Image (cartoon, rainbow, N blue to C red):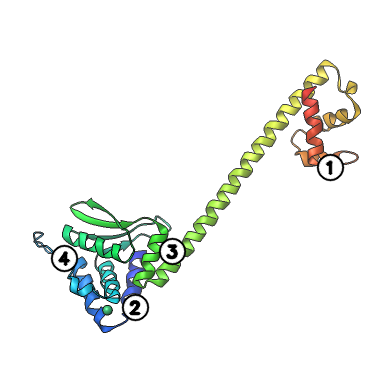
Amino acid sequence: MKSFSQMTKEELSRAKNKSNCCDHAEQTGILLFGTITPDLEEQYRIPQELVESECCKRALIKGAFLGGGTVINPRKNYNLELTTPYPALAKDMAELLESVGFSFKSVQRKSKEVLYLKNSEAISDFLSYIGAFRAQMELLNIKIEKEIRNDFNRAANIETANLEKTINAAVQQVKAIEEIQRRIGLDNLPDDLREVAKLRLANKDASLSELGAMMNPPLTKSGINHRLKKLMEF
Ligand SMILES: [Zn+2]
């Protein structure tokens, strides 16, 4: 299976540049970031005359990504990088990126200079800037899917938490009612409380709304809650 990087690069290599001037800039970007000479004393720089116009800045950056870029599958992680062994080239590129609105962070890894983005929005903007629109769409779709999944997990956790609260409350109520039964007997409770107490004992795992529905006449959840509180105070 192709990696997210490979798919992005295939899309980019099919995309045509706006004008002929950009082809040279793109090629230069590919060569600068894609060629690693054995002689690392060699110092590559970005030729400033090539990136005077906005269209060519974009083309050179696109080329740099084709030559030395990676973008991790957004399902795993949000990470886009440009790497080069040449520090001066990395510095030039960071400045060029800054001039078109992208703040890449930089780090040294295994004697390579790494410029990277870890923010999903910045990565999405960058993919669109270099013309990888399908990759951008894919990233945005995955992001939405992830967010929905997170919301769902959060909701499931809240439900579990609520369930536990309900169970704990029921346990406390049953304990209190059994205590009352032992001390004074349920028959000595006022009518409204006696009915609730008996129902609770008979239906230890029922929710408040379920208990309410069993009452005659039926009570709302808060009505039941009120009576159970009175029972607990008893
Ligand atoms: Zn151009």
Q: Earlier in the sequence, mark 4 or mark 1?
A: 4
The quarter of the image holding the C terminus is top right
Question: Which residue, given by chain and number where applicable, does mark 3 sit on?
Answer: 139
Q: What kind of element bears circle 3?
A: helix
Amino acid type for the residue under numbered disc 4: Arg
Mark drawn on residue 15: 2
Locate residue 77 relative to residue 165 in the image: left or right. left
Cα gap from disc 2 to disc 4, whole angstroms: 25 Å
Q: Earlier in the sequence, mark 3 or mark 1?
A: 3
Place of residue 228 in the rendered image (x, y in percent of width and height, measured from the top left): 79, 30
**Mark 4 against mark 1, which lies toward the viewer?**
4
Indicate which quadrant contains ligand 1: bottom left
Q: What kind of element bears circle 2?
A: loop
Question: Which residue, given by chain and number where applicable, does mark 4 sit on?
Answer: 45
Place of residue 10 in the rendered image (x, y in percent of width and height, measured from the top left): 33, 73
Q: Earlier in the sequence, mark 2 or mark 4?
A: 2
Tell me the crowding category of disc 4: few under 14, some 14 to 19, or many 20 or more residues within 10 angstroms, Cα based.
some
Q: Earlier in the sequence, mark 4 or mark 3?
A: 4
Residue under the image location 82 percent in, 37 percent down: 223
Mark drawn on residue 213: 1
Residue 71: name its quadrant: bottom left
Q: Nearer the viewer, residue 96 or 163?
A: 96
**Mark 2 against mark 4, which lies toward the viewer?**
4
Amino acid type for the residue under numbered disc 3: Leu
